Image (spheres, rainbow, N blue to C red):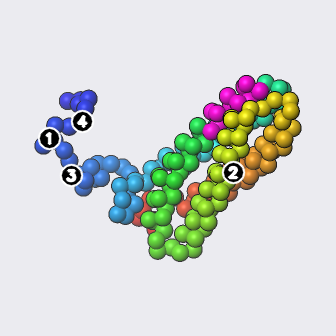
Amino acid sequence: MFRLFGARQGDQQSDDEVSAQDPRQYAPGTKIGFDPQLITRFKGHHVSLLKLFGQIKQAAETGNYPRTLEAISTFKNVLQQHLLEENIRFYTYLRICLQKDAENARIMNAMKSEMESIGRVVMQFISHYLQFGIDETNVKKFLTDLQGIGAALEDRIRREETSLYTLYLPPASY
């Protein structure tokens, strides 16, 4: 019978029974499971972020500043969601699974640190323009800054997808 609010007392399964039924596998010592769709989902986030980035640029170039700010706000929400999921589901999982692989752990930690720095810069940029707005007086600076951020994001996405994401494997593979 379908239960809207969960199982009755006594109907609960042990963690071993749940993990035996769950096709995902967990990182050792955690309940962070391997998700075979995670990288596909992250690549989808990247496509969305790049599309939104293009909308921001196009709106600013055509002088549609309200639409520019709207697109920036949407970009911010998508980016925050992506970074949060990446930190919890990806980096935490890899940190546990790569404990015996010092070289790949070092690469993963360096890329995580780099993404944190990029994330801070992007969020400062977004916060500044959401707070102060965009108009004819600052659109040139905005577009110059946007170009730099876009180049950094495109480079980062390329490197994540071609190298970092290849480290994400089922726990038995480590």
Q: Which of marks 3 and 1 is in front?
A: 1
Which residue does the image show at 33% across and 48% down from the upper left? 22
Q: What secondary structure is marked by label 1?
A: loop
Is residue 163 among the parts visible in the rendering? no
Q: Which of 40 and 91 is in front in this view?
A: 91
Report which residue position mark 1 lands on. Answer: 9
Q: Which of 143 and 48 is in front in this view?
A: 143
Q: Is residue 42 part of the magenta span, yes or no?
A: no
Does 18 sit left or right of 46 as displayed? Answer: left
Q: Which amino acid does label 4 sit on?
A: Gly
Is 87 placed above or below 9 here? below
Q: Is residue 71 part of the magenta span, yes or no?
A: yes
Look at the image and give the residue range highlighted in magenta.
65-76
Which residue does the image show at 51% across and 53% down from the upper left? 87
Sequence-first disc among 3 and 1 = 1
Between the residue at mark 4 and the residue at mark 1, the CA separation in whole angstroms equals 9 Å
Q: What secondary structure is marked by label 3?
A: loop
Q: Which residue lies furthest to the left in this view?
A: 10
